Structures are given as C-alpha cells and as structure tokens.
Image (cartoon, rainbow, N blue to C red):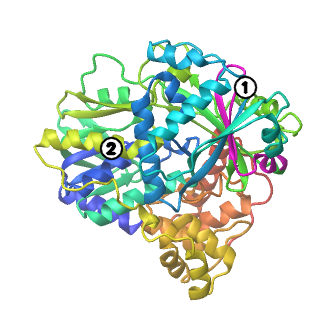
Amino acid sequence: MPDTRHQKIKQIAGNGAFDAIVVGGGINGIGVFHDLAHQGLRVLLVEMNDFCSGCSAAPSRMIHGGLRYLENGEISLVRESLTERDRLLRNAPHFVRPLPTTVPIERLASGLGNAAFGFLGFKGRPRPRGAVPIKLGLMLYDAITRAGRMLPRHRFRGRAATHAAFPALRSSVRFSATYYDAWISHPERLGIELIGDAMAQNPQAIALNYVRLSQAAQGLSLTDAETGQSLPVTARVIVNATGAWIDESAAALGARLEERLVSGTKGSHLILDNPALMAALAGHMIYFEHADGRVCIVFPYLGHVLAGSTDLRVNSAGRTSCSSEERAYILGALQGIFPAIPITPDQIVYSYAGIRPLPVSDADFTGRISRGHAVRRLQGAVPQIAMVGGKWTTYRAFAEETVDLVLSDLGLARQASTRDKAIGGGAGYSDHLAADLVAQQGLSPERAAHLVGLYGARAGKVAAFCAEDPRRLPEAPIWAGEVIWAIRHEQALHLADVLQRRSPLAIRGLLSRPLITAVAHVMAAECGWTEEQTQTEITLFLNDLATWHGVTLTGPEGAYP
C-alpha cells in the first residue's frame, strides 16, 4: 500500500467523524469535495473504483454551452453552461481550450417550430434544423455571452464558401455556421487536480478511491477494497453523487425513496486514426445532424479523431461498452457527412461508453431529456443530499448549489467561492512554459510539451521529480518517474489508473504489451507487488481493454529491468 494511502486510512482510524461524506468520485462528487474543503469542513470523499472512472471518464470531451438545449426551451441551462465554460477556459487553460465548431446545413427554414414545441413541452423527435432556426439560435447564443465575451461571435457561410472551407463535406450541404465552444484534453486529470487542490487547501479533507461506504445497524462503515479493512465513520450529512447508481446507493445507505430519481441513457464514442478525416476537419468540430435527428460530433483529439455519440435508454446502471451496432451507427454517420473519405472499423484505436445520469423523463426522443441538474433531500438515519443529472461543463455550479444546501442544513455560512479559483496546473499557466522548461531544465521540446500538456504549470515540478528516475518506458511518451508520481501524488493504485486516467496513453492508441509490462514493473517496485500480483494486474488490464474498449493487444510482453 502506498504510504500516502496508509496515512489517510490511519487518519480516519484515529477520527472517523466527518461533517460530510461525499459518496461518488466522479466529477460532480469531486466538485462538491473541492468546494466543501474550501469551506473548512472535515469532509471525506469515497469512490468504489478509481476517481473519474465511470461516466466521468466517458464524456464527449466538449466543454460547451449546449446549443441544442435552446430548442428544449432551457435558456437558463444554456446561460449557466456558457458561464461555466468560460470559467473553465480561465481556471484550467492547460486542459480546456477553444474549439471552432461548424454546423453543416442542408435546409433553409425547417425546424423553426422545434424551440416553440420545446417550450410547450413537446418531447418527440425534432424536425431537421435549417439555416433560419440555426441562425436565430446562434444569435441568442452570442447574446447570452455578450458581457465579458471570451470567444468570437458566430459566422455564416453560403454554399460556395462552405465547400471551399470544407471540400470533403457532402455536396447537399447548402450553408454552414461556425461558432466557438471548447474542448477538454484530459477530463480525468482535471478531476485528480481538483482533489489534490482540495487536500492541499484543507488537511482535514480526505479522498479515497477503491473504498465502499455501507450502512449497517451499528452505523456507517468504510471498507478498503485493497485490504479488506473496515472502519466506523460518522457524518452529519451524506452527499450522494453516484450518478446513474443513485437510486440503488441511496437506498443502500438508508434513504427512503418514494420514486426513482435517475433514468440513464448510454453514450458511446470512437477514437479513429484517419489522417484524411483529420485533415478534412481543418481544426474544427463538425456538429451535424444524423438521419434519425440525433446530433453527432467529430473533432480532432490528441492526434486522432473523436466521433460520437449514441443516446440509448438503459434500464439499469452498470459498466458498459460500445456495441457493434453503435460502432456501425457512428461510422455510418461519419461516412454520410464525409462520403468521399474511407471510414472503416479498422481505423478505430479505442472506444468508450458511459451511462448519462439523466433525470427520470417520459420524453419519447432521448435528445429531449434535460441535461440540467437538481438537488434532492432524502431522509434516513443520516440525511442525504442527492445530486440528480448534470454534465461535465456545469460540475462546478452544480457543486456550488449542493454545497450551499449542505451549509444551510449544517447552519454554516459560506467561507469561500470556487468561481475564480485556478485548478491544478492552471495556476500560473502560460503559453511559454514548454520553452522555459527547455531553457531551464534542458528538456527536449517534445518532452517539455508532453509535461506541460499533462501537468500545466506544475510541469517543472514533475520534471524535477522525474529526474530521480529518468528512464523512458518503451514505445510511448511516458517516463518511469511519471508512473511513480502518479502513485505518490495522484492516488494511482492499479495499471488502469495510470494508463487510462493519469495519462492519455490508452485513448491515444499508444498502448503495447512491452509498455504495459514496463509500467506494471515500475508500479510493482513502488507498491510492493509480488510477481504474481504483477501478472494479475497485467491480465486484468488486458481483459478490461478488450471487453470495455475494443482494444486487443498481441505480440510479446517484453522485458523490463
């Protein structure tokens, strides 16, 4: 067991009384933990797997205002989303960057009634969106952000200008509109940095992955999945941030539910290695409508192309993967909008899927289900505050709303706001950090860019740490020191934690058997694994890749000294 984890468990054993326990280490729970820590409360965050390993690891990787929410009549959600998008651009500039987004349009006035029907509560499939309603929507989108605007206003193109800018689009496209939103390079790392910031701010704030909170006759108990050790804990309030699992977890923790809170939908995405498609995008996201009315996306992502997504109702929460039918759907959508570019299944380097924790809805068309959020009080032996819905872009505002309710219930006043707090390596970030590392620490430009991309303004500190073990691991841009840093400073306990969430090696399609073997042996030396444990880790990780991400690695394992 890493020393830092042992110290946290020892701290809980010495004093298991908390003001609040946050259950669920996805982005919403992490946001609440971060905010509560800044209020000076003694707060515990518990996650049964790794942080940001469920739905929070499966977003579209867009930080956006939600243009299509306008036709559902959700102007307040769009306003909040745009405000939070701009905050993330300021507070996490190492991860969140502007993304020009282009909408190809084939009709003129079709879809004018979509928004009107949305305001009136219509929950069916919208009509195809034409140039006029899209223009009106973008004018409203721009108007919402006119005060303190961070990104350019939208622009419209006719047929000739559209096909000059994007010649690979299908010939039936008559217009296009370009507006700006944002994308996030490493969402899981942003969650890890929020946790680190919270614990640095407040020594009484503790976050643990791979633990379970349970309710028994004698009270609450915390069980470490790594060792089996159980500890009694108490809380004045529980914040339930378990997303799609909220109904089951709330009941298990003693809440009395009168009705279901969440009805999820499944969203799947693909990462493609397709240079022709990458070139055709010209640095833009193409935000287009499929034949079934579902909005699809495709944009450049870390050297490849990210495409999605599906939106399928599910009856229960659970780990999930992109099905063959979903792969065909996404590839077919791409082929339809870029008919001259070969788009084939063998170009897929990675796939992922997650369950969106949407509020219960009777909408016929899943795109009509609100992406808004709500907070619900649940009665039980320990009062629970349940977080229902939400999306990545608005996690901070959702957390703020939840924490305000927690503080009210505890009779406390807010001590600090997170609205303008830089996140992790976003504090002190600048565009010349990589050049500074080259000049000051003698790093290669490639190595400097790699570190700044992952750690932002903390890259220099990580580089100095890695100098103690400067071995570059085989076949990928990762060094032994980075693996050890992830264990000591970012709570990585398993191979997947390092290769999928502390680094982007998996989603970038950079994994190999020799690399996995090398990382496993670095972790074994740091964590005290036996050879049997090391081989078990490798086997479990390879099985997970094949089962949940469509990645099958062959070839020799390789050796590592």
Q: Amino acid at mark 2?
A: Ala
Residue beneath label 2, please? Answer: 399
- Residue 182 within the segment the image draws in magenta: no
Question: What distance separates the C-alpha of mark 2 from that of mark 1?
Answer: 36 Å
| Quarter residue 518 falls in | bottom right
For the residue pair 408 and 209, the one nearer the viewer reads as 408
User: What residue is at 55 percent from the left and 21 percent from the top?
Assistant: 366
Q: From the top left corner, tell me how far across and down residue 164 is, in percent.
A: 83, 44
Q: Amino acid at mark 1?
A: Glu
Question: What is the number of the mark on residue 197?
Answer: none
Q: Quadrant of the N terminus?
A: bottom left
Residue beneath label 1, please? Answer: 325
User: What residue is at 19 percent from the left and 52 percent from the top?
Assistant: 16
Check if mark 2's residue and mark 1's residue have beta carbons within 8 Å. no
Nearer the observer, disc 2 or disc 1?
Answer: 2
Q: Secondary structure at mark 1?
A: helix
Q: From the top left corner, tell me how far across and down residue 487 is, in percent.
A: 47, 65
For the residue pair 101 and 414, the one nearer the viewer reads as 101
- Using residue 402 as the reference point, say whether residue 76 is left or right of it: right
- Using residue 76 as the reference point, say whether residue 432 is left or right of it: right
Q: Quadrant of the C terminus?
A: bottom right
Q: From the top left corner, tell me how far across and down residue 547 is, in percent.
A: 66, 39
Is 365 situated above or below 493? Answer: above
Is 244 situated above or below 53? Answer: above
User: What residue is at 30 percent from the left and 44 percent from the top?
Assistant: 400
Q: Secondary structure at mark 2?
A: helix
Report the span colored magenta: 276-299
User: What residue is at 60 percent from the left and 87 percent from the top?
Assistant: 439
Q: Residue furthest left?
A: 411
| Quarter residue 333 falls in | top right
For the residue pair 70 and 43, the one nearer the viewer reads as 70
In primary-sequence order, the first of circles 2 and 1 is: 1
